[in-house]
Image: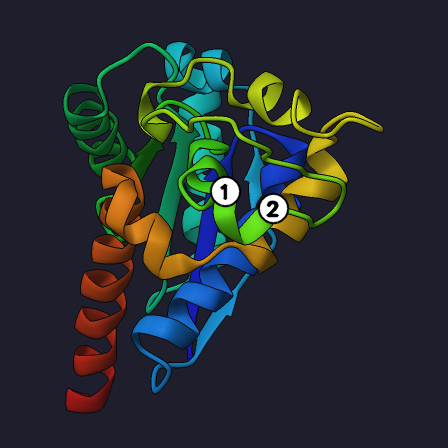
Amino acid sequence: MINVVSIVEGDGEVAALPVLLRRVNEWKNPDVFCNILRPIRVRRDQFLNREDVFNKQLQIAAALAEDDGWVLIVLDADDDCPKELAPQILQRAAVIVPHRRISVVLANREFEAWFIASVDSLNGRRGFTLGKTIVPDAETIRGGKEWISKHIPDGKYHEVTDQPAFAALIDLEAVHEKSRSFRKLCKEWLAQNESIFLKLNES
């Protein structure tokens, strides 16, 4: 059994990321059983800028992952470049918990970009109506939550309830095709779990 412990920045992601990861696992490597634990929620700015918070949360995640598990950090890139910031976070984390496998994935620009990359699969679901809107490149939208809210005429996008629901509905192949940061998530998922799986079989 492989424990996967995630670190996320929002209450919505606490509920949504396990849904998404279970779907990715079923899609990409269904033969590997992963125990996806409840994510650890952090405040992005504190987590990245306060060493005491960074160290504490990583040590908690490492303990929960146990010897054969791994730690997955999933944050919004916001205005940062994922290709620049993710390696920096990974390097810092490896110093704190060198005894654990770690991956860092930054949703470009926000977690909601993965939903927008598959808006066709959301159209007509949970009040979301696309209409004749021309959908821009999902990873260029700053304010994904607001963009989605504009397409829910009778209500507003609620992270805690809509994120896990949308995570269960999106077309993963469409997101994989249109979102580079989601492809990074899938790549890390395969690489880490297959590596641990091989190690377990060899022992």
The structure residue drawn at horizontal position 62% and vertical position 43%, both measured from the top left corner, is: 14
Q: Nearer the viewer, residue 84 or 1?
A: 84
Give the structural element (helix, strand or loop) at label 2.
loop
Q: Is residue 173 visible?
A: yes
Q: Is residue 101 visible?
A: no
Q: Which residue is mark 1?
A: 119
Distance Cα–Cα, label 1 vs label 2: 6 Å
Q: Amino acid at mark 1?
A: Val
Residue 73 in which image quadrant: top left
Going by the image, does 131 lie left or right of 50?
Answer: right
Instruction: Residue 94: give x, y in percent of width and height.
Output: 21, 38
Please rate how many residues cluster around mark 2, counting C-alpha atoms within 10 Å: few if below 14, some from 14 to 19, many from 20: some
Instruction: Residue 56: give x, y in percent of width and height.
Output: 48, 30
Checking the image for residue 123, the label placed there is: 2
Which residue sits furthest front?
A: 132
Going by the image, does 160 lie left or right of 4?
Answer: right
Q: Are marks 1 and 2 in contact (CB under 8 Å)?
A: yes
Going by the image, does 166 lie left or right of 162?
Answer: left
Q: Quadrant of the C terminus?
A: bottom left
Q: Quadrant of the N terminus?
A: bottom left
Q: Amino acid at mark 2?
A: Asn
